Amino acid sequence: MSETAKISVAQQKGGVGKTTVAINVAGALNQRGRDVLLVDIDPQGNATENLGMPEVYDDEPPTLFDCLTDAEMRSHVTEIVREHEEMDVIPSNIDMTAVEPELTLSRRSGEQLDAVLEYVADDYDYVIIDCPPNLGNLTDNALYAAQNILVPALAESTSKRAFELLYDHVDLLEADYEIEINEVGVVVNRIDVRKNQAQQMVEWINQAYDDVPVWEVRERADIQYALENGSSIFEYNDEADVCEAFLNIAESLDSQFGFASPSDSEVVQA
Ligand SMILES: Nc1ncnc2c1ncn2[C@@H]1O[C@H](COP(=O)(O)OP(=O)(O)O)[C@@H](O)[C@H]1O
Ligand SMILES: [Mg+2]
């Protein structure tokens, strides 16, 4: 049995596909029979809403805010886990909008999420953390807890600067906390094959990060419809062509983290 794999989906720009990638990679891992916990630490709560649970965003305490800001409340995280048909979810909450300054008050400001996840992570094969669109304290908490990063990016020239800033920040965090953060891959998202720019960007990323897998996800309305419908693409339309891209990511993650492929376990049972 492999240890729980924790992966933060992070990039400081908004709208690049963090939430989309987090939910659909979780959906693809579920298709492969993995137990997944998705953690929405973005105070805007997009993943919480896109998984069809907008009402829990307005829940009364205890919420993730309390678990992160009060050491005595950490164990209460088990009470806030919600079930979705494809995965379990630690939802965000409106209270999370006040968490950044509160976290700064604690001596080990970047280690709070890690301490909270200790109460739940063991029950899952994967913990996927959907980060907010900045490199603040919450993203640091996600990176510290996961020590693995999956980076979504758009296929446009501004992404080059975004990569530089992100990896500079990761380097700083590694030095500050004396940890190593492993890059599991880059997802070039919203690719429009009619535009040359997309292919140029994929080539640039492949050259710049030659030891990291680079996946391509096309611009597809079905992805948006699925999220509006409260699920990954797999619940919404498992015949959509983009399913393959997310399944490829899930397959690579299983191999990177030492989970046997579904066909392997079928062979064992046969
Ligand atoms: N491959 C895609 N095809 C079509 N729409 C997409 C795709 N990826 C993301 N979107 C849409 O783009 C918007 C921003 O994506 P999102 O995942 O919320 O970004 P982030 O979490 O980085 O802010 C959402 O409305 C989402 O539905
Ligand atoms: Mg998001």
Image (tube, helix red, strand yellow):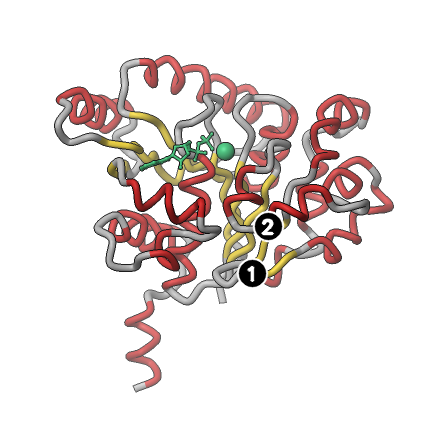
Q: Which amino acid does label 2 sit on?
A: Met
Between 212 and 155, the one nearer to me in the picture = 155
If you read the primary sequence from the N terminus, does the residue marked by circle 1 or circle 2 appear first? 2
Between 73 and 80, the one nearer to me in the picture = 80
Find disc 2 in the rendering and name its residue.
53
User: If the picture is divided into quarters, which one holds ligand 1?
Assistant: top left
Q: Which residue is drawn at 35% across and 27% down?
A: 153
Find disc 1 in the rendering and name its residue.
124
Q: What element does badge 2 sit on?
A: loop
Quadrant where the C terminus sits is bottom left
Report the side of 192 relative to 13 (left or right).
Answer: left
Q: In the image, is residue 252 above or below residue 265?
A: above
- Quadrant of the rendered structure where residue 33 is? bottom left
Position in image of residue 235 (x %, y %): 39, 59
Residue at disc 2, CB closer than 8 Å to ligand 2: no
Mark 2 burial class by Cα count in 10 Å: few <14, some 14-19, many 20+? some
Mark number displayed over residue 160: none
Q: Which residue is drawn at 56% across and 34% down?
A: 143
Q: In the image, is residue 156 above or below residue 147?
A: above
Q: What element does badge 1 sit on?
A: loop
Mark 1 burial class by Cα count in 10 Å: few <14, some 14-19, many 20+? some
Q: Residue at x 71, y 55 (%)?
A: 119
